[in-house]
Image (cartoon, rainbow, N blue to C red):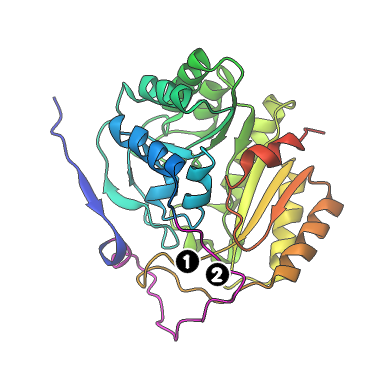
Amino acid sequence: MSKIINIKEVGKEKTSRLPIKFIEKDKLVKPSWIKMKLPNSDKFHEVNRLLNENQLHTVCEEASCPNIGECYSQGTATFMILGEICTRRCPFCDVASGIPLEPDKNEPIKLGLTIAQLELNYVVITSVDRDDLKDGGANHFSECIKEIRRNNKNIKIEILVPDFRGKGKIEKALEILFKQPPNIFNHNLETIPRLYKRARPGARYEHSLKLLKDFKKNMPSIPTKSGLMLGLGETNEEILEVMKDLRKHDVDMLTLGQYLQPTPYHLPVERYVLPIDFDNLKKEAEKLGFTSVASGPMVRSSYHADEQAQGARSP
């Protein structure tokens, strides 16, 4: 029996070991259009209670999402499976890094029952990167989808997957997911290729594009989706080029949102993108043929995902 090891690092402890160091700058003043709603409603506390009782995690909490109050209050959440510890150290992300425990075999059952209790019609399932697992966690995703549908016959499921670049291969992970496919397949590029080494160490731009294309090739009727953060040092022109790459790889849906620094030890915000720029980028995305585009300062990959999915289709 292998020894159980559990190492969890956050904030400075997490990012200080990265080879690329951040140059401290005067912090930009948040503009008036960046607004967070405080989590204070009966529904928020109900969702929180059920998650704690069933020892489940949401990316809303683990990644310090600014929309947590609004989403919980509406009875929606993005569930994060495979534990709360990521095997990577992306410096834009507030999720803890380290050596995770073995996957909880009972998590799919608990997840399915909790979602049934919440009476959700649409759910997003994501995970930390699990480079320690041979399939990258694909089988766990599949089991979760199966258990959610067992308890919720008419539910729509979106999965927001990692890139499966660890011990496994894209082909192995996708072969597993094809047997229990979601309603929407999401994988975020996060930023432009020039900033990958700085923002997404361990990831590769072309690999992520290939993951999206390979899923679409085998499951043409299922919409594919990706998201980008703005404000890490890219230009709008570079974002437009990434959008073109996504369409070349048959991605149907897109989210664009403002990056917000989780702690002083994470990547700094290089710029606050104007709302009019988000509007213009949305128009450009629609011209390129995306069937559904959510673009705005407070947009996140799964923010109002149910509403975005209603208008989505696969060409």
Q: Earlier in the sequence, mark 1 or mark 2?
A: 1
Q: Disc 1 and disc 2: Cα gap in Å?
A: 10 Å
Check whether the beta carbons of the residues at disc 1 and disc 2 lie within 8 A of each other: yes
List the single residue furthest toward the bottom.
Answer: 26
Direction from residue 109 to residue 304 in the image, left or right: right
Q: Closer to the camera, 13 or 117?
A: 117
Residue placed at 82% from the left, 58% from the top? 283
Is residue 237 visible in the rendered structure shown here?
A: no
Residue 253 vs 145, above or below: the answer is below
* Between 38 and 16, the one nearer to me in the picture: 38
Tag shown at residue 304: none
| Residue appearing at x 31%, y 52% in the figure | 97
Magenta span has 37?
A: yes
Give the camera-side residue of 197 and 68.
68
Main SS of the magenta segment? loop
In the image, what residue type sits under mark 1?
A: Arg
Q: Quadrant of the N terminus?
A: top left
Q: Residues within 10 Å of mark 1 (few under 14, many from 20)?
A: some
Q: Element type at marker 1?
A: helix
Q: Is residue 271 left or right of residue 242?
A: left
List the residue tagged with mark 2: 232
Q: Is residue 209 left or right of residue 174?
A: right
Q: Which residue is mark 1?
A: 198
In this rendering, the answer to whether 24 lies above or below 9 is below
Q: Does residue 68 belong to the magenta stretch?
A: no
Which residues make up the magenta segment? 14-38
At which x and y percent is residue 177? 54, 24
